[in-house]
Image: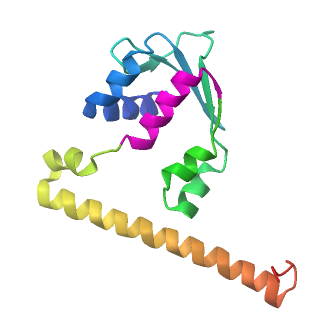
Amino acid sequence: MLATLPLAALNHLLRNENWAHRHLAAFGGQTVSLQMPPLALCLEITPEGFFRGAPAGSKAAVTLTMPGDLPFRILAKGGDRAALLSSAQISGSADLADCLGFIFRTLTWDVEGDLAPVVGDIAAQRLVRGVRQFVAWQSRTFSNVTRNLADYLSEEKSVLVKRS
């Protein structure tokens, strides 16, 4: 059950981008293992270029292992995809790994397009802008708190060694 939500979200993104599932279609029948502790997904690429749950016991052609602290890295780096993907460990087929890397780096979610039929175009645009501003504020706050904590621990308490 835990795997159905990420699988549906991934296929939704692919459905909106024809180029992406055309790239994946070349690897139809191969299996991809996505690991981010405690979550582990084993997905099979369909001949149409989408993902489905892989049969039990299937061997993964590519394994992508994301660090367990990924949610904190997302907050700290503000969703910088290149930095987040560089922290992944990849093993297996180089061609498939390259294709997946390209797709994950460039695939975007049209949030406004998905919200517009539900709440209207203007409301969707304002909601997305408000959420982006909120996330940016949270990211800045997290960055400021960690910097202030480091300063406090190095200057006031002398727990950490200063850079100089």
Q: Quadrant of the C terminus?
A: bottom right
Q: Quadrant of residue 88?
A: top right
Tell me the chief SS of the magenta region. helix
Q: How is the image coloured?
A: rainbow
Residue at image point 20% right, 46% down: 113
Judging depth in this view, the residue of 70 and 123 nearest the camera is 70
Residue 134 at x, y = what percent?
A: 39, 68
Seen as rendered, the residue at the extreme bottom is: 156
Q: Is residue 55 above or below residue 157?
A: above
Q: Is residue 72 above or below residue 86?
A: below
Give the magenta part as a residue range.
91-107
Question: Is 14 displayed left or right of 161 in the figure?
Answer: left
Q: Is residue 30 magenta?
A: no
Question: Is 40 displayed left or right of 137 in the figure?
Answer: right
Judging depth in this view, the residue of 148 and 103 nearest the camera is 103
* Residue 42 visible from this viewpoint: no
Residue 43 at x, y = what percent?
A: 51, 20
Q: Is residue 134 above or below residue 121?
A: below
Residue at image point 62% right, 77% down: 145
Query: Count the marks: how many?
Result: 0
Residue at image point 64% right, 46% down: 87
Judging depth in this view, the residue of 99 and 117 nearest the camera is 99
* Residue 76 visible from this viewpoint: yes
Residue 34 at x, y = what percent?
A: 58, 30
Q: Is residue 103 magenta?
A: yes
Residue at image point 26% right, 28% down: 18
